[in-house]
Amino acid sequence: MIHCQECGADNMVGAIFCRSCGAKLNLNEIRPETEMKKQASVTKNLKTVVGRIVALVVLVALGGILAGLLLPAPGSVVGQLDDREMQRAVARARQMFATRRQRAFTFSSEEITALANKLFRLDGETGATAEGEAEQESGGAGLRPEHLSIQLLSSGYVKIVLRSRFMGKLPIYCTLLGNFEAKEDGGVGFELFSAAMGKLSLPGPLQDTVLARFQALLATEPKLQNFIARIVLIDVEEDKVTLTVK
């Protein structure tokens, strides 16, 4: 607004004569400072609002990424067997390890998961190692393996989920999806199709990091490496795997 130097009335910016007393406004001496301050204030407020919106969007995005990293992959197998079922599975596994002639052994997803956790001394319920409070680190500082899930899918696919605890607090889920194949010279190879951290799929370069977590866990059991070399055939079906060893 422009103030009249004669009567003090307010006039619109651009007026030549005062709307109240009719006096000619001295445009050379008038400075619409109020309007300039209002425009500056509006601009400042607009920048503040935009900044808050951007910050909110970033926080929501980071929250979504963090939630995706911490959420477990769907379809994880707990591997809970009652005492009788566990005894049968262990007895069959011992026969498989001890046999010196070619034989086939079949296990379900629940059985192979329970046996794997027993072999690596993991506890699917509490996440504690069999040794008690000792932290078993594998493939990364501060990450303690807690539970291994093996889900047998159709068409030979296998989903392996390793739950670890970061610094004893945050659960981290590493997932591999692939296909086991027996090698011609003995042993088993694993063709990796995808890898994920939580529910977030990882690009190629980062898949090796997840694969290294599983390889480090396998390396803790040298006897298992010797057994894998004796496998001559592996047949994966829906919720069932048949291992033929020699």
Image: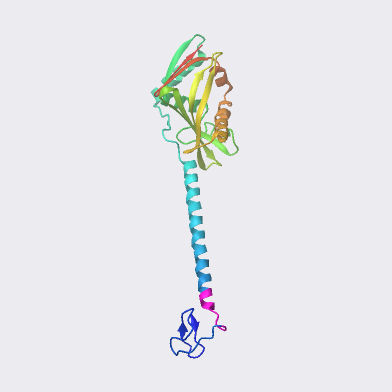
Question: Which of the 4 image quadrants contains residue 154?
Answer: top left
Q: Position of residue 181 (x, y in %)?
A: 50, 19
Q: Is residue 33 magenta?
A: yes
Q: Nearer the viewer, residue 17 or 74?
A: 17
Q: Is residue 47 above or below residue 168?
A: below
Q: How many marks?
A: 0
Q: Residue at x 55, y 21 (%)?
A: 224
Q: Nearer the viewer, residue 99 or 243?
A: 243
Q: Position of residue 100 (x, y in %)?
A: 52, 10
Q: Is residue 51 above or below residue 181?
A: below
Q: Is residue 124 magenta?
A: no
Please provide the residue range marked out in magenta: 28-36
Tell me if residue 136 can be seen. no
Q: Is residue 56 above or below residue 212?
A: below
Q: Residue at x 58, y 39 (%)?
A: 142
Picture colour scheme: rainbow
Q: Residue at x 54, y 78 (%)?
A: 33
Q: Nearer the viewer, residue 143 or 67?
A: 67
Q: Position of residue 110 (x, y in %)?
A: 41, 26
Q: Nearer the viewer, residue 207 or 222?
A: 207
Q: Residue furthest right?
A: 141
Tell me if residue 105 can be seen. yes
Q: Residue at x 42, y 22 (%)?
A: 155
Image position of 123 (left or right of 138): left
Q: Is residue 36 above or below residue 92?
A: below
